Amino acid sequence: MEIEIDNSVKKWIVRFRTNSKKSTIEVRNKGVFEINSPLDISRYQKEIIEAVTPFI
């Protein structure tokens, strides 16, 4: 799953990936973070907000 802010530019901001072994969330220009539960996403909320804010 990818969250795109501007469809005309087609640049991704946040990517969520999962497979049988792990789930990760990748925040553009901030890094890739492994998550084990939805609560883990809250640990990275600062990075997510910083990545999305310029596009709002």
Image (cartoon, rainbow, N blue to C red):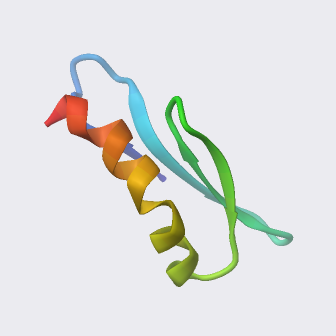
In the image, taking residue 3 as reference, residue 40 lies left or right, namely: right
In the rendered image, residue 25, in percent from the top left (x then y), is placed at 59, 55
Say which quarter of the image contains residue 30. Answer: top right
- Tell me what residue is drawn at x 23 percent, y 39 percent: 53
Quarter of the image for the C terminus: give it: top left
> Does residue 29 sit above or below 24 in this rendering?
above
In the image, taking residue 20 as reference, residue 23 lies left or right, namely: left
In the rendered image, the residue lying farthest to the top is: 9
> Does residue 49 sit above or below 13 in this rendering?
below
Q: Nearer the viewer, residue 9 or 43?
A: 43
In the rendered image, residue 5, in percent from the top left (x then y), is placed at 24, 36
Say which quarter of the image contains residue 51. Answer: top left
In the rendered image, residue 19, in percent from the top left (x then y), is placed at 76, 65
In the rendered image, the residue lying farthest to the left is: 56
Q: Nearer the viewer, residue 14 or 48?
A: 48
Number of numbered callouts drawn = 0
In the rendered image, residue 38, in percent from the top left (x then y), is placed at 52, 80
> Does residue 50 sit above or below 35 in this rendering?
above
Q: Nearer the viewer, residue 1 or 29?
A: 29
